[in-house]
Amino acid sequence: MLNTPVNRLRWIGILEGLSYLILLLVAMPLKYLAGLPLAVQIVGSIHGGLFILFVLSVLEVTIRRPWWSPKFWAFAVLAAFLPFGTFVFDRWLLQVGQQRAPAPVSSQFVQNACSAFDRPQFST
């Protein structure tokens, strides 16, 4: 589940997006309507940590997947600042990841490759 940089980015993005929505829709009203500023301090700290993890994860994907373009960075930054943006970004990552996934290796190819080691290479 978290074994590839892209999967880690997807999960961190979802958590960051959820924390942003909780900050905007729960903590901010609690601060301004109910007079509870502690809610923003707690949720804001969690969201800030997740935002930093999101940026570091985008950097990791950029380093490990050199085919990502500046468009990727622009979309990631935009997604991080817009409500529901990371969810759209996650869907885009899923689609791009499926397009860029390596083709599966056929079993016939594996059998041929393994049987090549059974044959003598030189005749005497």
Image: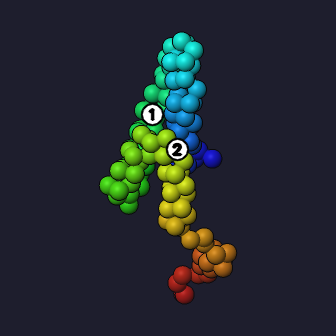
Q: Quadrant of the C terminus?
A: bottom right
Quadrant of res 103: bottom right
Taking depth in this image into account, of 19 and 103 the one nearest to the observer is: 19
Mark 2, residue position: 84
Q: Which class describes the residues within 10 Å of circle 1: few (<14), some (14-19), or many (20+)?
A: many
Q: Which class describes the residues within 10 Å of circle 2: few (<14), some (14-19), or many (20+)?
A: some
The secondary structure type at the circle numbered 2 is loop
Q: Residue furthest left?
A: 70
Rendering coords of residue 46 (x, y %): 52, 25
Taking depth in this image into account, of 116 and 62 the one nearest to the observer is: 62
**Residue 51, numbered label:** 1
Q: Residue at x 39, y 46 (%)?
A: 78
Report if residue 39 is visible in the image. Answer: no
Report if residue 84 is visible in the image. Answer: yes
Rendering coords of residue 122 (x, y %): 52, 84
Q: Residue at x 52, y 44 (%)?
A: 84
Asked if disc 1 and disc 2 are in contact, CB closer than 8 Å, the reply is no
Q: Name the residue type under label 1.
A: Phe
Cα distance in 3D space between marks 1 and 2: 14 Å
The secondary structure type at the circle numbered 1 is helix
Q: Residue at x 61, y 78 (%)?
A: 109
Pointer 1 or 2: first along the chain: 1
